[in-house]
Amino acid sequence: MAKTNIRRRRANKRAVILAAAVMLIIAAIFLIQAIRMHRENEILRKQKEALEESLVSEEELRAFLEENKDKELSREELIALARERFGLVFPEEILFLPEE
């Protein structure tokens, strides 16, 4: 009788240790996934902010073009406006910006 109690206790201890180990592994997996999702969320948040800024500048450009679509401007005036107001350059140009 005493031997069977000892065996049961050992078996119970093993089962508890095994269950705890499995739970720790599952917790570690969840933690790793949470960290990955947090990083991905930060990346997506930054992309969203950049796209929102781009959208604002594009809306400003559209509004400016709508306001000035009927005006007769020379090519040089259009280029100057595009450079000054929106920082646009031709594809073959290299833009050097001052460091802040």
Image (cartoon, grey):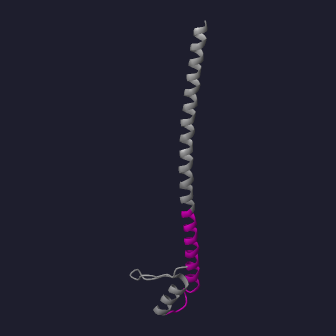
**Secondary structure, magenta segment, majority class:** helix
Q: Does 19 sit above or below residue 58?
A: above
State the residue in front, 12 or 47.
Answer: 12
Q: Does 25 sit above or below residue 95?
A: above
- Residue furthest to the left in view is 92
Read off the magenta span.
46-73
State the residue in front, 67 or 55.
Answer: 55
From the viewer's perspective, tell me whether residue 62 is left or right of residue 90.
Answer: right
- How far across and down, in percent of the image, does residue 12 sit? 59, 20
Question: Looking at the rendering, which quadrant does residue 85 occupy?
Answer: bottom right
State the residue in front, 11 or 63.
Answer: 11
Based on the picture, tell me whether residue 58 belongs to the magenta stretch. yes
- How far across and down, in percent of the image, does residue 80 sit? 50, 90
- How far across and down, in percent of the image, does residue 29 sit? 53, 41
Q: Does 86 sit above or below residue 30?
A: below
Question: Looking at the rendering, which quadrant does residue 7 occupy?
Answer: top right
Based on the picture, tell me whether residue 63 belongs to the magenta stretch. yes
- How far across and down, in percent of the image, does residue 51 sit? 55, 67
Assign the N terminus to one quadrant of the image. Answer: top right
Residue at 42% from the left image edge and 82% from the top image edge: 94
Assign the C terminus to one quadrant of the image. Answer: bottom right
Residue at 56% from the left image edge and 42% from the top image edge: 30
Q: How many marks?
A: 0
Residue at 59% from the left image edge and 25% from the top image edge: 16
